[in-house]
């Protein structure tokens, strides 16, 4: 993809090495390429000594100028892998949190197609956690990590994200960035930047937080979701001081491709309102039956067999929302890990594609993270509250999915805005036709955790 061109006004930098941004998407005033004239790297070559970022004591400060690199001497340090107990606690708590968030969103958006990326959400929140202290830190850590300490949680999530890397068969991208408003009012602590570099390889940008910054942030999102999500924000509020952003992109082909004869066109899907919609179904014979709370489903492998698509049909008469509400994340992981390979499964899976966007602010407050959004929020490990008191203003989450006979593409972005102030038996046959609302997930096989989790209530969106 072509490089995203960055305005000279943008003051941006990487903690270790410069990263080129791509801009395949369109902004409101045309393509990003049309608007921008210099890449970060090119602008870096133009800066004078007076424009280089200064590092004073515990803080990273920036002088005015065209382009500056914050923390240019900081490189990621080696981090310790989690213990087996910490890894298991992380999987259990992340699974339950994933389903708790999904329950809240399906209830709020009843009847709509919903998809979240738990990995994107917790990655953005973990970066923010590393700047929290006091009760704010305690609440965030309890919601995210359960019994884990902050160090244990960082180790577990960092290890998990490293495992979710690209392979010869699958594209998996997880990128993190921190965007800071330029000016003397906000001085960022070096330890906060270093910690997020160590665990999440987060890159740091400083900008004027004007409309040019909106375009640059959206360009970064577009690049790091492989063009599937081209915008996460429309504008920046006057009191917004920092964005902590995670982007996830997934692209994989099926391990066993659907042949043309397996594509059933001119079929019907009954949506959540009981109306019939035109559909194309993908028919295949699968193995690995999942039975959970009365629902039946299957897991279909992507190339490389590191990721699987899981679809579960709720019991007859039960909506996808009510079925999600009945599940615990750890039960889903156990059901996935203990699939029944005895029966033959004849599955019909509809092709579908949709986008989803939501704010997670109320959901996270309800789950026990309210202090981070309040005037009492303590993010003193980001900056001295005597200089500026920060709180989370919003948590924006956007996702995209495309599923067809060739495979699946999915992407997510999470932006956290910080504001200032036995014996052989005859096999039974199971038929699963997903011709009504159903639940699905893209699961990391090693952990059993859903990387993406969603519902299909309609094919018409």
Image: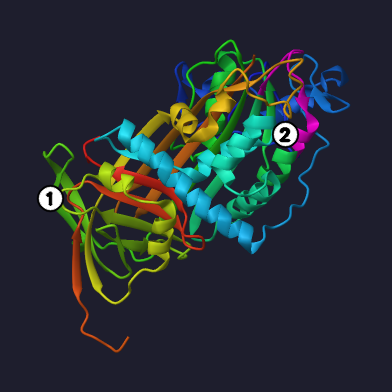
State the residue at coordinates (67%, 50%). 152
Q: Quadrant of the C terminus?
A: top left
Circle 1 packing at 10 Å, graded few (<14), some (14-19), many (20+), is: few
CA neighbours of label 2 inside 10 A, class few (<14), some (14 to 19), many (20+): many
Dot label at residue 267 = 1
Counting from the top left corner in percent of width and height, residue 120 is at 52, 41
231 and 132: which is toward the camera: 132
The percent coordinates of residue 346 (x first, y second) are 21, 67
- Residue 231 visible in the current orientation: no
- For marks 2 and 1, the one nearer the N-term is 2
Q: Which residues are magenta?
A: 180-194
Residue 4 numbered tag: none
Q: Nearer the viewer, residue 278 or 104?
A: 104
Q: Which mark is residue 14?
A: 2
Q: Of all residues shown, which one is farthest toward the bottom?
A: 423
In the rendered image, the vertical position of residue 11 relative to residue 168, given as above or below: above
Q: In the picture shown, does residue 63 fall above or below 139?
A: above
User: Does 192 appear in magenta?
Assistant: yes
Q: Can the viewer see residue 422?
A: yes
Quarter residue 65 falls in: top right
Picture coordinates of residue 81 (x, y %)? Answer: 69, 58
Instruction: Give left or right: position of 61 versus 272.
Output: right
Q: Residue at x 54, y 36 (%)?
A: 223
Q: Residue at x 22, y 80 (%)?
A: 427
Badge 2 marks a residue whose secondary structure is: loop
Q: Position of residue 184 (x, y in %)?
A: 77, 13
Is 108 on the left-hand or right-hand side of 133?
left
Say whether residue 227 is magenta: no
């Amino acid at each position: 993809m072509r490089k995203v061109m960055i305005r000279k006004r943008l003051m941006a930098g990487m903690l270790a090495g410069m990263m080129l941004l791509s801009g395949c998407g369109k902004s409101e005033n045309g393509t990003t390429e049309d608007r921008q004239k210099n890449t970060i790297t090119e602008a870096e070559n133009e800066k004078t000594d007076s424009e280089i970022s200064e590092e004073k004591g515990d803080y990273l400060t920036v002088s005015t100028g065209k382009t500056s690199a914050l923390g240019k001497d900081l490189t990621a340090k080696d981090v310790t892998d989690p213990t087996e107990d910490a890894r298991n606690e992380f999987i259990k708590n992340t699974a339950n949190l994933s389903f708790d968030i999904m329950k809240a969103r399906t209830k709020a958006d009843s009847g709509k197609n919903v998809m979240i990326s738990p990995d994107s959400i917790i990655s953005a929140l973990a970066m923010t956690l590393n700047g929290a202290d006091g009760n704010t830190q305690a609440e965030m850590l309890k919601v995210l990590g359960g019994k884990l300490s902050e160090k244990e949680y960082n180790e577990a999530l960092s290890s998990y994200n490293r495992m979710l890397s690209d392979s010869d068969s699958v594209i998996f991208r997880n990128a993190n960035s921190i965007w800071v408003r330029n000016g003397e009012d906000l001085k960022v602590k070096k330890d906060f930047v270093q910690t997020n570099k160590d665990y999440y390889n987060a890159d740091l940008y400083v900008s004027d937080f004007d409309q040019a910054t909106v375009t640059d942030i959206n360009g970064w999102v577009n690049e790091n979701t492989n063009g599937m999500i081209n915008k996460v924000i429309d504008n920046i509020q006057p009191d917004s001081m920092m964005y902590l952003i995670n982007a996830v992109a997934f692209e994989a082909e099926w391990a066993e491709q659907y042949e043309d004869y397996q594509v059933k066109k001119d079929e019907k899907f009954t949506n959540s309102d009981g109306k019939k919609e035109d559909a194309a179904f993908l028919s295949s014979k699968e193995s690995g039956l999942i039975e959970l709370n009365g629902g039946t489903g299957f897991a279909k492998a992507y190339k490389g067999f590191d990721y699987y698509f899981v679809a579960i049909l709720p019991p007859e008469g039960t909506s996808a929302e009510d079925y999600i509400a009945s599940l615990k994340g750890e039960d889903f992981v156990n059901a996935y890990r203990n699939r029944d390979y005895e029966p033959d499964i004849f599955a019909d899976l509809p092709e579908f594609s949709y986008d989803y966007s939501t704010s997670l602010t109320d959901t996270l407050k309800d789950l026990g993270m309210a202090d981070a959004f309040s005037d009492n929020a303590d993010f003193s490990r980001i900056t001295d509250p005597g200089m500026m008191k920060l709180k989370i203003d919003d948590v924006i989450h956007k996702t995209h999915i495309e599923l067809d006979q060739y495979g699946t593409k999915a992407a997510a972005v999470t932006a956290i805005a910080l504001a200032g102030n036995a014996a052989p038996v005859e096999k039974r046959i199971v038929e699963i036709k997903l011709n009504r609302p159903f639940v699905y997930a893209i699961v990391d096989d090693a952990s059993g955790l859903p990387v993406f989790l969603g519902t299909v209530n309609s094919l018409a969106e």
